[in-house]
Amino acid sequence: MVQRVIRQIHDSKIDANITVATSNMQRDALINQLGDNIEIVTEPSRRDTFPAIALATSYLSKCKGISPKEPVVVMPCDPYTDANYFQTIIKMVESIENDIADLVLMGIRPTHPSTKFGYIVPKKDNPLYVERFTEKPSENIAIELIKLGALWNGGVFAFKLGYLNNIVAKYSTYQDFASIRDHYSDFPKISFDYEVVEKSDSISVIPFRGLWKDLGTWDAIANELTQSCIGNVLSSECNNTTAINELNIPLVCFGTKDLIVAASPDGILVSDKSQSDKIKSTVDLITSRPMFEERRWGQYSVLDNHEYVDGFYSLTKTLTLNPGCSISYQKHLHRSEIWTFVDGEGIIVLDGVSSQVKRGDVIKINRNQLHALKAINPLTFIEVQLGDFLSEDDIERCEWQW
Amino acid sequence: MVQRVIRQIHDSKIDANITVATSNMQRDALINQLGDNIEIVTEPSRRDTFPAIALATSYLSKCKGISPKEPVVVMPCDPYTDANYFQTIIKMVESIENDIADLVLMGIRPTHPSTKFGYIVPKKDNPLYVERFTEKPSENIAIELIKLGALWNGGVFAFKLGYLNNIVAKYSTYQDFASIRDHYSDFPKISFDYEVVEKSDSISVIPFRGLWKDLGTWDAIANELTQSCIGNVLSSECNNTTAINELNIPLVCFGTKDLIVAASPDGILVSDKSQSDKIKSTVDLITSRPMFEERRWGQYSVLDNHEYVDGFYSLTKTLTLNPGCSISYQKHLHRSEIWTFVDGEGIIVLDGVSSQVKRGDVIKINRNQLHALKAINPLTFIEVQLGDFLSEDDIERCEWQW
């Protein structure tokens, strides 16, 4: 989705510097997808949309030296839209440049009285400006709102950087970005809509009529898929069931109705389709570590994770390094690692001594032993971590000149 | 279930020699659960109930030398029953001993007009004998059958061994058990009911009234469970949903209704509860290798399974050997194995040389290298198999004196 949005921005000839605001966990996957030249601001912890946008605009001010007079557009990357959407964004920027309002929103022309979106109600006498907002109304109220010319809130905001700087200053007075990020928890856990939009008395809205599909729920994604089963799935006697299986074990769906089933290394979801917009609070309860991650150097999956009676732990992963990529020169205080190479060729460095590794080689890395690895061609190995404490944080990095 | 049934047979003071008929795959798990002293007959391939019973009775005749006059009772191990069930079995044996009929069935007194069972209709004038059978009738016909005194067919059969020997002789004339088993495919793929029961004209039925629950479907098992969620399951807004998760990743059920979700290393099932009796033909399509197996020496799980572009394969397992148990002295033609020991202590033998292994040790076993392993205490290791052909059949066993 983020690749498509960035491609569409370029196709629309919008002359914009793009910065992606995301979580730490998505960082490497984004760099792999978008390349090294993309600006990325990562939240140190998950809060809400206001802190995330505040951090990103602080980055623009403090790190990039962007003028307070510059217009900024904040847009989500999950709606599936056509080119007119980006023409509307250009109009929003023009409105900000022309000082039409402090804040300019995109209003999506409703196609039906949806109960799942927020509605923007324009002023009766001047529909260029916003009268009020109504969050997720009942169907009857939605019908009334549409009669009044109300639009769905597309979550696209335009403003001058200085406008948000003033709001950010209420919570964070640090002058450098590193300190603002270090004190990220000073920002209240609140959405941008509540903290900024609803408090503003100068809001304009630009309507957009065209293809706009919010792919923020499994139900919406299922509607866009051309297949009902993806991956190793056997389905029989099912009705309106979408099954996506990224695991390498079979998934059988039998006699199910209106269901979404999604299985991945991180977990399995079985949800009624019409309620898939409500799963967030339940899924948020899951605190387990990621089982699959895309990294700058390649990717890994956790295969096994075990605690023994004496308080020792083992963690088994399969890792693949992309050609030319490397794992930094590092050591661990609390664990040893055993690497069994199963495919490809690479160069390993152990305490300053480098040698070549290939399929069938086994390397044992002791605690406190410095090690680095570089792939010549795609290099896959099984890693067994063993220690009294296993954490991605138990890492001390050093320099190595390849 | 099999442990419970055998305990109940002993509790009922039935003086019986017990033989378990099962598939090859279940053999080691059964020995672990029942001990070494149990007689087990394993089918070389999956056919149907007549071949399975024919093989088991051939074993009794040819290997155990049981007289053709001896009564034999065939019973499934999945019904959940009370002690009276076993008293009824004693009555069935007495009927066979007294030559009441060639075949004696157990008839379960119906509690409702079920459409899922076969019905035994007794003779009007002499309800000790069977008039006819009706398989899975409609509810209306079931109501009529119950009025006629019909009973559910409990799948328990008693006969003299010689009676079945004569039927077996129609298909297999080999005089030794090994040859009968080697030519198992000579037996027709047909159920015992169709091949034996429905062709007999001398059948008696002994009614049983008491606790009898067929746990042969997920729906029936779910009804007997005291919890709706077992394992790592998060369930919200669900109705009549049973979720069992044996995987170490979270399972989320949201807004589901009348559903059974079962996740294990071998696969994931999502089924409408009321249709869970029909999943067999769909699940039978799955041909993948077992991902978890209990063996005489312990257990293993497959963690990862990969084929590389050059036709090489890797397979990663975690294995645990029980204390005192060992893996036989063996070698493989097509694969090397790398063992990383993560817990416990044991003794390894490599080409005749034995040494001790413990947590953190890594052993590389080359193709054609003889190796054996014995656990001193519970011994867990990660095995990476690497080769051009990975199969449990690629094994050559030798003798080793521990």
Image (cartoon, coloured by chain):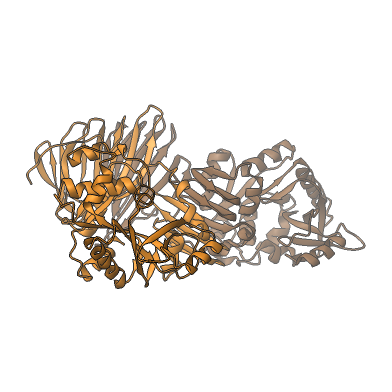
Chain colours: A brown, B orange
Residue A329 percent location from the top left of the image: 36, 42
Q: Quadrant of the C terminus of chain A?
A: top left
Residue B388 versus residue A292: which sits nearer the camera? Answer: B388
Q: Residue at x 60, y 42 (%)?
A: A227
Residue A91 percent location from the top left of the image: 81, 47
Residue A71 percent location from the top left of the image: 74, 50
A238 vs B189: above or below: below
Question: In terms of image quadrants, where is residue B208?
Answer: bottom left
Q: Residue furthest right?
A: A125
Q: Residue at x 33, y 36 (%)?
A: B314
Question: In terms of image quadrants, where is residue B398?
Answer: top left
B331 vs A213: above or below: above
> In the image, A131: left or right of A160?
right
Residue A335 versus residue B235: which sits nearer the camera? Answer: B235
Q: Residue furthest top?
A: B310
Q: How many marks?
A: 0
- Residue B216 in sight from this viewpoint: no
B291 vs B1: above or below: above
- Residue B27 in sight from this viewpoint: yes
Residue A345 percent location from the top left of the image: 35, 30
Question: In terms of image quadrants, where is residue B150?
Answer: bottom left
Q: Residue at x 25, y 50 (%)?
A: B163
> In the image, B27: left or right of B206?
left
Residue A193 versus residue A142: which sits nearer the camera? Answer: A142
Q: Quadrant of the N terminus of chain A?
A: top right
Q: Residue at x 79, y 63 (%)?
A: A142
> In the image, B137: left or right of A102?
left
Q: Residue furthest front?
A: B125
